[in-house]
Image (cartoon, rainbow, N blue to C red):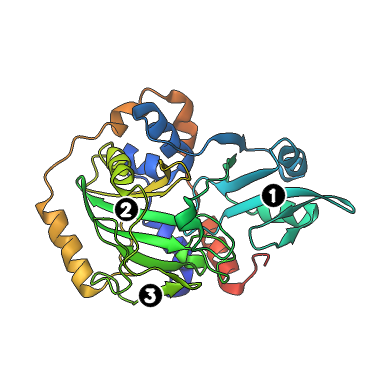
Amino acid sequence: MAILRRSNWLARRLMTATVVTPERAVARNKLVTSAAIGDLSDVRTPRLLSVFWDSRPIIPRWLGTLPAEFVVKSAVSSVGRQVCVLRRQPGDGGDVYLEPDGRVWAMADLKTRIARMPRPIFAEEIVLSHPELGALSPHGTLCDLRLHFVGTNLVVGRCRIPTRRSRGYGNVGRGALGVCFHPDGRLDTNHPFARLQAPAEVGGRRVDGLVLPFWTDALAEARKVAALFESPHVGVDGTVAPDGRFTVIEVTLVPDTKWMSARGTLAFRDALRRAPPKRGRVEAWVATRPDLWHWVERRIPIETLEEMAAMDAAGAELR
């Protein structure tokens, strides 16, 4: 097997998420995660619009069947690199597509961009944040919350605030600002679990001490999702919608602790040691959905992963 250097972070990250249990398979694939949450709970997830498996020439026709605003994702991607939030509008030579920061995609370029995404690709409705959260983003886009549960107890959360550098996307890997919050929903720019401090204000708005809107209800909804998995750690990604309901976007079972301080890492370790066993429902559920097995069993060859990592390192992705 090829030796993975530090620059091959994408390949290494996805390799370490190799599916070894049905639970890991579910969490790794965003399509299957949404299906599990929808079947096993009443927690809200984004509405699925369409799944795309076809060849590259069909992409323009597929995009034309979607609403004017939508999100395109790869079901098996990470770090938010294979996500496009798009709005269609008429152009001189046909329809063009705009991203949150106003970047315009002609159809030929967008077709190339989408064709590079690992299959399956899917489209879902755009998720909006509560106005109190959307106001923190320069483009008014989604503020993404990640809640790290050990058992059903929230250890720490992280609010990912879009920036101009991230082009309106709430992914820290793309330049969004990460601000930790306590189990009471209070943002803390000097959180003891964070390796780096965050600015107390964003765009002239006070972030430090801000309490997430409808926090009690949002926490209860996220806890329902954590309880579905036997895994001791469950990271629940989502946001508080304009109507106050929590919307789950995806789930991760492998904790990413690179952003944590030594104190945070030790607290996480101690919480995992103290956590009692859980009885999840996802593993038994997968057997009842044979229609999902072709997604659950899908693997990405290491050659493909290393090619993707090399493209990222070389800046080959369209900007």
User: What's the distance in space between the residues labelled 1 and 3, CA to CA?
Assistant: 32 Å
Q: Position of residue 13 (x, y in %)?
A: 41, 60
* Residue 78 visible (yes or no): no
Amino acid type for the residue under numbered disc 2:
Leu
Earlier in the chain: of badge 2 and badge 3, it is 2
Q: Earlier in the sequence, mark 2 or mark 1?
A: 1
> Distance from label 2 to label 3 (Cα)?
21 Å
Helix, strand or loop at mark 1: strand
Circle 1 Cα neighbour tier, 10 Å, few/some/many (<14 / 14–19 / ≥20)? some
Give coordinates of residue 64: x percent, y percent.
Answer: 75, 39
Q: In the rendered image, which residue does mark 3 sit on? A: 200
Q: Mark on residue 147?
A: 2
The amino acid on which the numbered mark 1 sits, given as a three-letter code, is Arg
Q: Can you identify the residue that label 1 sits on?
A: 87
Examine the rendered structure and indicate whether residue 256 appears above or below residue 238: below
Residues at marks 1 and 3 touching, judged by CB atoms closer than 8 Å: no
Indicate the secondary structure of the residue bearing disc 3: loop
